[in-house]
Every structure is written in C-alpha cells, then in structure tokens.
Image (spheres, rainbow, N blue to C red):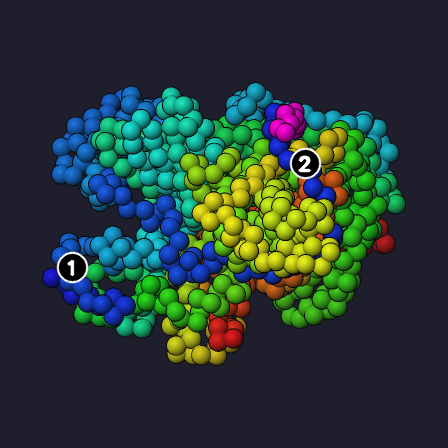
Amino acid sequence: MARLIRTEKEVEGRYSEQWIVVEEDALDQWPEGPLAVVGRDVARVDGVERARGKAQYTSDLQLPGMLHTAVLRSPFARARVTSLDLAPALALPGVRAALGPDDLEQLTDEPGYVGHAVAAVAADTFGQARAAVERIGIVWERLEPELDPEEAVRRESWVNDGPTTYERGDLERGLAEADVVVEAEYRTQVVLHNALETHQAVCHWEDDGITIYISTQYIWGIRDAMADRLGLPKDKVRVVCHAMGGGFGAKNGPGDYTSIAAELAKRTGRPVRCALTRREENLATGNRNATIQRMTAGATADGQLTALAGEFINAVGFAGWSPMTEGPMQMLYACDNVRTTNYGARINTPPNAAFRAPGFVEGTFGLECLLDELAAKLDVDPLELRRRNYADSDRIDDKPFSSKNLAECYRRAMPHWERRHEVRARSTGSWKHGVGLASQIWFGGGGPPSYAWVRLGADGTAQVVTAMQDIGTGSRTAMAQIAAEELGIPVDHVRVSLGDSARGPYASISAGSSTIPSMGPAVRAAAADAKRQLIEIAAQRHDLEEAKLDVEDGRIVSADGGSWPIDEITGLLDDAQILGKGARGPNPAGMRVLTFGVQVVEVAVDVETGEVRVDKVVAIHDVGRVINKLGASSQVEGGIIQGIGHTLSEERHLDPETGAVLTQTLDAYKVPTIADVPEIVTDLVDVPDPHLTNLGSKGLGEPPIVPIAAAIANAIRDATGADVRSLPITREEMLRALREAEERAAAERSKVAAGSS
Amino acid sequence: MPELTVNGDVYELDVPVMRSLAQSLREDLGLTGTKVACGEGHCGACTVLVDGTPTLSCITLLHSVAGREITTIEGLRDHPLIAAFVRTDAVQCGFCTPGQIVSASALVERNPSPSREEIRHAMSGNLCRCGTYPKIEEAIATWRD
C-alpha cells in the first residue's frame, strides 16, 4: 500500500522538508563487496552509440521548419536601454520574429552584467539571426558598475537577505585557550563550467502544450520552472533529454534561452532552437564565484583545535545564491568553538551557478591550507593533526553520521603520505618536490522523491523506465547494473529508457552527487517488485511455494532443486509484461548523510620559473557502496582533472574598470588537456552505508574535486616552504609566494643573527 | 558546385561559399556525429580526416576541401578504437568522443604502437571537459587488444 511520509530533502547542502509517497516494502541491503554485477567493472551500456556519434544530443536535433535564434547581450556591466527598435532586424531576409524586454521577462532593459540578455531574433538560419541582431537599433545609457565584492560588502549590497552567521561554543574562550593561532586570507577565482555542449533548448508547441528538448541536469525541474513561466499546467510541458554534453552544475535550470525559444516558437508557430555560442557560454550561463576567505585557527600545543573562525565573501554576481563556503570549517573537524559569517556580495558580474561542490571546493582550499599552516607552526604532522581533531558526529546539530569511514581513508593514505621524505629527496637543481594532503567532506546522500518502473517482457529481458537524465556520469549503466543484480539476469539483458518526462515517472536532479543515491534504490525496488511478481507466476505455473523460489543467473531456482529459464515463465505472457514499480524511501531520520575522503598529492615546482607540475594524485574516498568500479574511477579522475584546472590554469579574467569578460574562448580560458594529467590512483572504501536506503550508496560526482586544490597547495608548501593563498597558482602567483617565503626566511635569519650578537 | 567525398560516398553540394565543413556535414548531410563545441578551432570536437589528416571542420570552409576524401566518425563505426574507448570507459558525456576517436585513428594509422608521450602529443588538441583523459590514453595505448 502507498505510504505518505514527511521527510527531509538535501541538494548541495540546502535542506527542505517535503511529503513523499513510498509504495513498496523496504528491502534488506545486499551483502558488502562485489556482487554478480554490482560492484564490478561494467562498460557503459550506451558507450558504443556515444563513441560512434550516434547518441542524440539536443544540439543534433533538426526538426522540420526549425528556426534559429541569436541573442543580443549587453556589452556593458550596468546600463539602461533608452530606446530599442526591432524593425530593422525584422526587415532582414529570413527573420521570422524578434523579442525585446517588453515581450519577455527574461529579457531586460536594465542589464546588470556583461552578457545579460536584452533582445532576441529567430530566423531561418543562425547566420541570418546573428546578422539581424546586429541591426537592432539600440541606445544605451551606461551606468557605473559595482565590480569589487569588498566594496559591495561595505555598501551592504547582497544577493540574499544579508550576511549569515553561525556560531557554536565560545570563540573568544577558544582563542584564549589556544597556544598557537594562525590567521590567513585565502582567495579563489571565478571559473567557468565550459561543458562542451553549450546551453541550449529546442521548443516546439503542439496542440495546447509545449515540448522542450534541452541539454539539462534536471528534466523535472525544467518542466516545473517552464510550466510556471508559461502559465501552463505542469503536464502540458514535456521535457526531453536523451544525451547531454556535460553540465557540472550549470544546467540545473532553464536559464534565459529556454524562455526565449519558447516565446519565439509560440509567435512563429515553428520549432525554435536557442543555442548559445561558446562566447555566450562564457558570459551568461553561470560560473563558480570568486571568494575571499579570512580565517583564524587556534590550537593547543598538542594539536587540539580550540577555535575556528572565518569571514567568507562570495562574489556572487548580479544574481545567484551565496554558496556554503564556510561549510568545511563548520563540519570537517571536532572543534567546540566556531564562528563563521557568509557574505553574498551582489556585483555587476555574470550570476554564479552551482559548479561541482559549490562552496566546498573553495572553502576546503582555505581551511585545509590553514590546517597545514597551523601544523607547521605547531610542528605536528599534518595527517596527525587531522586525526587528533576527528569528528565522530556532526557538530552542527549533534546528529550521528549515517556512516563515516574517513579514519579508514586516512589509514589507506599512510603509505602514500610516508613517501614524502623520499619524494622531497628527489629535488634537484631548481626543481623542488613535495607531498601534500587534504581531507574532503561534502553531501551526496541524495533523497526522495524518485521513482522507477521495471518492465519484464516475454523474452526475459528487462527495461528500466524512469525520466531521469544521464549527464555523462554513467548513471544509465549503474541503473542497468542495479536492475540486473536484483533480477538475477546479465546486465546486457537490461535496457534503460530515460530522458523523457512523458515516458517515465518523476526522477531526481543530477546535481549534488545525488543520481545514484536517489535513483538507484528506486530502480532496485522496482526490480524487486517485478521479481516478486515473476516468482508468484512461476509458483502458480509449477505449483510451488513462493518462499522457496529465487532468481539466479537468468533462471528461476527452487530450493527443492528445480530450475527454469526466466523466459519460460515470462514467455507465458505473450505480449503482456510484468510491471514493477519502485520508489526511493526516506533518508535515515536523525542522521547526517555525508561523503568523506582524503587526497595525497605529489608535486614538483621549478623555483626559477614558477612552473608547478602535479606528478601524482592518490584519491581515497568513502561514498558507501560502489556500483560500477570502472565508472567510479572515471568520475574520480574527471573531478581531479577539473580541479587541477581550477588550481593551476583556469581563471575568468574581467576588466576591473568595465566588467568586460576577457576570457570568452577556449584558447584564452585554459582548461586542462591530456598533457596536463598526472598519475591518478583511485581507492574507494566501498563499504555500504548501513543506514542509507536499500543500496547503501552515496554519490561520487563531486567529492573528488573538493580537496585537490588544498592538497596541491600543501604539497607546494612541502616542496618549497612557500604559502600559496590565491588561486589559480599561476607562475606569477608561485613566484610571488616564493619571494615572500624568501623574505620571511631572510627576516628570521637577521632576527636570529641580531639575537646572537 | 563543390563535389565532396565523405566516408566513400560522393556528394554534390549547392551551398554558399562561406559554409563550413562542419556545418555542411551536420546540416546538409545529417552526419551529426561530428560535434561543434566552440566553433572557432580551439577544442577539437569537430575533428574529421581530410585525406587522412586530422582537420578542424568548424574552421574549414567546404569549398576548400572539394575533391578531397573526408572521413567522419560515421566512417569509423567499425574501427577497433570504438570498442577500445567503450571497454576502457573513455567516454563520459561523449560530446568530445567522436573528435577524440577521429584524431586517435590518424595517430594509430601512422603509428600503430604509440608511446604514452606520443599519445599525449597527438591528442592534446582534443579537449575533454569531463576529464576522461586517463581512459582515452589507455584506450589508444591498448586499441588492438
């Protein structure tokens, strides 16, 4: 029977309460360790079609009569449109419709950042649309932009209701109890997602509803948001995404382009594509916002943390939200006295968007570097310092963790950490070698609601049906494995049908490392429901007791000795099918579900040129049960490589006077290439979380990118003695840090000399 | 009218002089395996072979390759690299993958046993934002397995 449950839902650290309906009985978790299909290396079920270029991305869709859109975007960070004339654009050949700020809420006559959408044109070809946009008659009144986040803080210009402060214990007492106190300011830059498929949608009105083909991380979120914007009942909005070319957090919502395409499609009666160019992608689709982190840490001489404090400024942009940059400081260590303040500065730069563990990537860089600075002052081993401050329960609201195997991660890190003496000894000439580490904490428990169906056909093969999306993480393959495991059939006997809100039940967002922990348990429940029905039918057919039947290796097996191929039973159905339904149950009440890990990094630094080379990364993470070992290692490698870009080469450059974005292309904005990749060793603890769902699996998309910047910076300190406190660690920043370290050493030498004279 | 040979088939295309090869392949011939990710020759997603040489089709004008042999990912559908990429999980979102495989096919054609360094050198013009690089390297190093 259907049960109605009130439960807590978390996405990227933001919690909300909601009602969910759960239909099936709870299943016991599978035993720990690799099973028949789950926990093994499995090649992607859609790998061949993607590799052959046959997978259908939104960018590949060509509907009959489809029009193309170009968008007029503000060249100014802050301006007012004093007059706008679309007529010259509409007069050009091939132009079918044009929109201005009066026509659509997502277009503005008071742009607040470079790239803010002002007008749009639909034409037969993209070239015609772009030419027409150039001809729009527009008069701008330029206004003085606010580009400095610290000035915005002084002026109290916020993206939210204002600063938020968190406090536990007594910070002043904690500082008084400390034998050693370190203070430092850390800064991180703006980085751009640059998924290779740009943001885009094709909108097509049919009857009284709309079909939206879109490159998205959240089919159902697009449905709800667009139903709201268009004033339609939700079920009149169908959202389709079969394959998508990367998101990394920037494709959770419909943006401006979906509304532009929808309105132009409505006006022309034709399907309309609105696809951003690479340059627009780097202006108007979100970014990881810059941060300024002013932090203090105090500890007793034996390395017990007594105080942690931080002021965290998020340079959010013209809109967006203020990520939880202070999260790691609040959550990672057992410190009794903590005070953090989060400022969400509103400035005239493009709005931020979630980017793979937003806030925690930045905050972990600050905190985990500060911990190493503290360790150096205390003369305590950095790994030992982390062990001495191990949190056994969640310190924000005193909840137990559903599971935490960070101590096991630290244990596995030891052999790699112990190599540092040997690595350092490799230094020759201007190349200095060193080892650093950093810990990881992040969410990733997923949650309800999420639903799946499993259909068993006459031929004994299964089809998983759910309207989720596979954003390139391999979640489609993981779902096939889970269904195959539960049904006792090979993974190639399972097809997975995803990507269409009209052809499957509600499914979770693919953000916050939530796809597997949210969807996996629903798929397993659906498969179990189908299996139960299969056994019921087999029992009746062969006059056996249901309790004595199970399914193994594609056969129904009786405890009394008989066995029958599945298709002998399903074959009785002819064209009918067994339909299993499954729902994701609630998260464990009263517990905090988090992911943990540690990374150990070896670097080499050329102290003459400032070149930093990452030689090796060992990534040890605890994310509960691993579904696909091969796919999991790809997630880890991908997160680390993206993190290496964040740490060493990527930065959105902005003209500080005008707010113009100077890095709009992939030659100016430096994402890592294959030549920048170090040796990466993935080691996953792979122990199911005993309290979390019927799987015990957490998410893995984000954890690997969280600690990498700090681990690299700490390795640089180990190699050179220099404190790098600002990302990216360009040669310029590296040389600055080396000079500063040299000056500090010289000052200490002269102090010692003065003392001894 | 430019005559084009794509994957062994001859096409006559009546298109404007400024039409790019990528656009023509995708829109005129419906060969959407060739992806366009930047449109200005920086990322390698649109790589095709022109007489066996990896070429960025988004910054190649159609008329300039008239009479030449074009090979796209659709022409490599049974190349052993396809299976190698799938086996080693060298496919994440898959948007760069066709371009990666086209570039890799030219590499293994002239050098069937490339070293890791040679792979990195040959493949450094093909960006992958998902960071699939270790697996891509593995796929190419073991493509005949």
Local packing at callout 1 (Cα closer than 10 Å; few below 14, some 14-19, many 20+) is some
Residue at 27% in and 26% down: A100
Give the quarter of the figure containing the N terminus of chain A: top right
Q: In this view, does A228 lie above or below A741?
A: above
State which region is magenta.
A1-11
Image check: A89 left or right of B34? left
Which amino acid lies under the numbered mark 2 shown in the image of this protein?
Asp
Q: Is mark 2 on a helix, strand or loop?
A: loop
Determine the CA span between mark 1 and mark 2: 61 Å
Q: Position of residue A281 (x, y in %)?
A: 39, 43
Of marks 1 and 2, the one in the foreground: 2
- Nearer to me, A5 or A645: A5
Residue at 22% in and 31% down: A268
Image check: A556 left or right of B83? right
Q: Where is residue A147 in the image (x, y as percent from the top left)?
A: 47, 32
Residue at 81% in and 26% down: A170
Q: Label 1: which residue?
A: B13
Q: Main secondary structure of the magenta part?
A: strand
Q: Position of residue A619 (x, y in %)?
A: 67, 56
Q: What element carries label 1?
A: loop
Badge 1: chain ID: B
Which amino acid lies under the numbered mark 1 shown in the image of this protein?
Leu
Badge 2: chain ID: A
For the residues bearing labels 1 and 2, Cβ distance under 8 angstroms: no
Q: Is residue A547 magenta?
A: no
Local packing at callout 2 (Cα closer than 10 Å; few below 14, some 14-19, many 20+) is some
Image check: A136 left or right of A662? left
Give the quarter of the figure containing the C terminus of chain A: bottom right
- Nearer to me, B50 or A145: B50
Q: Position of residue A648 (x, y in %)?
A: 55, 53
Q: Does the magenta stretch include residue A5?
A: yes
Q: Label 2: which residue?
A: A25
